[in-house]
Structure formats: structure tokens, C-alpha cells
Image (tube, grey):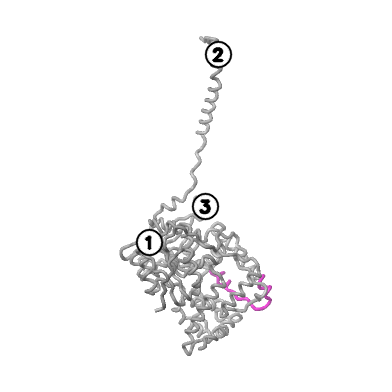
Amino acid sequence: MFKPRKATAAPKLRTLLPVVIAAVALLVTACARNTDPVAPPAPTLDRYYQQTPAWGSCDGYQGGAELGAAGIECARVLVPIDYGKPDGDTARIAISRLRATGTRVASLLTNPGGPGAPGLNLPLALAKSPVAERLDLIGMDVRGLGASTPHVTCRSAAEYETGQRVLGRTNPLAEIDQVEQENEDYANSCARRTGLTLLQHVGTVDVARDMDVVRAALGEQKLTYFGGSYGTRLGSTYAELFPDRVRAMVLDAPVDPTTNIGDEVITAAGFQQAFDAYAADCAKAPDCPLGTDPKKANENYRALVDPLIQHPIRGLNYGGVTTATIASLYHPSSWPDLTKGLTELAKGRGDALLGDATTYEDASSDDVHRAVLCLEEVRVTDRAVAADIVRRSRTAAPAFDDGIGNADTAAPLDACAFWPVPPTAQPHVPKVAGLPKVVVVAVTGDPATPYPGGVTLAKTLGAALITYEGTQHGAAFEGIACVDRPVLKYLIDLTPPAEGLRCAKP
């Protein structure tokens, strides 16, 4: 039976009631919170850094048969396309490995340059050099290229061939409109076929971050790296991002970090210097197709190639012969082939030069090359500025002044002016606090990356500079003992070369 409580208890209950209500409210709130779903942790890069490559046959990779025959293994490493979204779309980076033949020191990640040069076969090119004895040689096809997936695709191979057009000499303003329309169409095609996400993330910073994932996948605490040409821009960028993760770094044929990767005026001057050296060497022979007076070489070369602007020879047009000539100027070993090709051209044939032109580039490499430059070079969006660049380039390289169009007041804007994604990097002085000693190798007569850029890069990185006196693109692992010995010693035991080391041509 219910019994009424004593009246004296009522005041005490009334006093405790607010406390009880508050306690119940807190309990209810806590219970409600416990029923809410727990927020997932923010995505991280752990799964990329913790992977182990599944090394195996190179079958199915570009050039796989040749790699396999040399004992090279291949694998792919997973990376995020956008490092800001680790749980987003991914890419697979193809890597290759040639194991050290002797006592192994480390893995040497390599890059041949470009942008847009496949690197999977670089260990094959270095297989007979002394570096192959003590280091595992690692090749890599950068994102968007070669055996790595997905690809940057702007044109088919057939469209690439069709695009190698030569403009006429009439109605230059109409030509400017036509060229700009083609360049805009090309940029739009890149966006449509590649996708904006990948197109925005094929630049140097993203590739440098891929390199760090590869380093971790190889089981290396720190990176040992060799990069040539544009590969030096990759190296200096990695050094900026991860200075404390560098063990050793050799940067050969260096790109000036404070200029555009492919600065037209600088490279024009470099190739003219190499052309002058070639012409002087060729002139020693009485049957040189440019004559025996080096001072007339520019004029004689123009007389050979200019007719191709209007009258190609069996598929060899003006652009093809210029491409073949420039390709031959990278190294003196190609000068005899250039002489042979120009001699044939003087007789109305172009087979040799056509072969050199078609092996120098392909559509995929060219598309990646353009994509990286558009992401990282200072864009020109003013026709007058474009014209000034053309004028200065022609002045710097008279041998390659085609005289096409009218650059006095305007010149067409290139594809980068219409690029569908914004720049992701710009030329600058690297900031590399805490970077260990690295090595820069620069050639006094380098046509593609002129010597002053190497001096600048060495200074900004606090690097040891090896200077080679010659005319070629890069000097490391070329069989030049004065260069290779100190480079190898540095890579093996981290002893840097003597300051101010200069090597003359043997």
C-alpha cells in the first residue's frame, strides 16, 4: 500500500531535484553522443609508403624483352594522382631494377630528363658503367608516360605526324590566327583525352613525391639519385621537399632552377654554339656539306634546308630536318651521322635525316613534355611578348632562323596560353636548408642546358661542381675518367669531389 511521505522530507527532495534533472540530462546527452557514428580518421599516405614492389618479368612493359634479356626486373608502385587526396584516384608508376653485380651499397634511382623521356631503360644504358657494380640501378617511367598508367594523351600517333606542318610565307596575320586556333584545339584535346585531374598533376612536384614513395618501397631510408638534364630539376625539387631524406645526389647537365625549363632564348644560344663547334669540325674535311669555311656554315646550312619549307623531300620537311639536326648536336658521336644526312640532302635525298627525326620524338613523350612545361613555365599570353622571344631566339641562333612569318610586331601564342589548368610551379631559387653535400656536373659547351645554369644550380644547392670542358649534353658515366671516378667515389662512400674540379676532353 502506498504510504504518504512525511512532510518534513519534502523540502530536501525539492532541494535535490535540479541536481537530479541535470544529471539525467547529462546522461541522456552522453548516451546520445555515444550513438553518433565515429568520424573516420583523415586519409593518409601510409598505404603508399608501406608497399613492397612485386618484382618480376618485364614482359608487357615497353621495351620489356630487351630489359629482360639484360637481367632487369620490373614492377609497378601505386601512388595517388593528387597527393592532397590520398583516397582519390591512383596511378601506377613503372620501375625497373638491375641488381648490383658486386657488394651493394644502395639503390640508385635514375632519371634521363625530358620532361617526357621514358626512364625504364636507363639502367640498361648504365649497365656497363662502374656504377652498376656497387648500386642497384633503378629506372622509372614518370607518371603519364611509357609503362606507367594512366597516360597523358593529347593526340594519336597519326595526329602527331599530321601536326608536323610547315607554314607558308604569306599572310602572316592569318597564320597567327590559324596557329593559335590549332594550339587551343591541342590544349582542349589534352584536357578531354587525359582528364583535368591527371593533367594538373603531372608536374615536377608530383613526380618528386612519387620518387619518395619509390624510395620507401625500395626499403631505402634515404634517396640516392642520379638525374640528367630535366632530371636535375626533379632532383632539386626533391631536395626542396625532402632535404633530410637525401643520401647522395648527382645532377648532370643541369637546368637552371631560376629559368624556364626550356627557355627558348637560352637553348637557342646553346644549340648555335654546338652547331658552330660541329661546323668547325666538319670544315676540316674537304667534302663537308657546309663547306670548308666555318664562317659560312650558317649561310650554307640555310641554303640546304630552306627549300624544304615549300618542297619537302619524300616525307622530310623543314621541321624534320631541323629536329634531326638538333638531335645530332647533343653529342659529338652523332656528328658523322649529321654530316652524312646533310650530304644526302645536298643530293636531293633525305632518308638519313628522316630516320633521325622520327626516332627523336614520339607523340606520348611530346605530350608529357608540353604538359609539364605548361604547368611550370612563365606563360606568355601577349603576342608582342611572344614576338620578342622569337626575335631574340633568331638572333641567338641564326643557323635556325627559318624566317617564316612576321615576328616584328606579333607572334602566335603557344598551347600553354590556352592550357586548361593553372600553373603549379614557377622558376625560383631553391630553399634547401639541411641538404647534405650533392654533386653537379656541367659541360662548358652543353647545347641544351648551357653551362651558366649549372653554375647557378650548384651555388643554390651548395653543391660540389665538376666542370667538363667539351661540347655535349652531360658528361657523367660517359667514360670520362676525370668525371666518373669522383662521381662514383661520392655515390659509394659520400666523399665529395674537390672544389673547383675541371676536366678537359681526353
Amino acid at the residue labelled 2: Ala
- Residue range corresponding to the magenta coloring: 157-177
Asked if residue 170 is among those painted magenta in the image, a careful observer would answer yes
Amino acid found under the numbered disc labelled 3: Gly
Considering only order in the chain, which callout, 1 or 3, is on the residue closer to the N terminus? 3
**Residue 320 drawn at (x, y percent):** 54, 77
Q: CA distance from mark 3 to mark 2?
A: 64 Å
Q: Which residue is denoted by mark 1 in the rendering?
A: 107
* Camera-side mark, 3 or 2: 2
Q: Residue furthest left?
A: 103
Q: Residue at x 61, y 72 (%)?
A: 389
Q: Are marks 3 and 1 in contact (CB under 8 Å)?
A: no
How many numbered discs sit on the rendered protein? 3
Q: Nearer the viewer, mark 1 or mark 2?
A: 2
Q: Is residue 243 visible?
A: yes
- Categorize mark 3 by other alpha carbons within 10 Å: few (<14), some (14-19), many (20+): few
Q: Position of residue 430 (x, y in %)?
A: 50, 61
- Secondary structure under badge 1? strand
Residue 129, horizontal then vertical, whole percent: 36, 70
The residue where tag 2 is placed is 10
**Which sits earlier in the primary sequence, circle 3 or circle 2?**
2
Please report whichever mark, 1 or 2, sits nearer to the chain's N-terminal start: 2
Left or right for 50, reference 193: left
Mark 1–mark 2 Cα distance, whole angstroms, equals: 83 Å
Front-lying residue, 56 or 337: 337
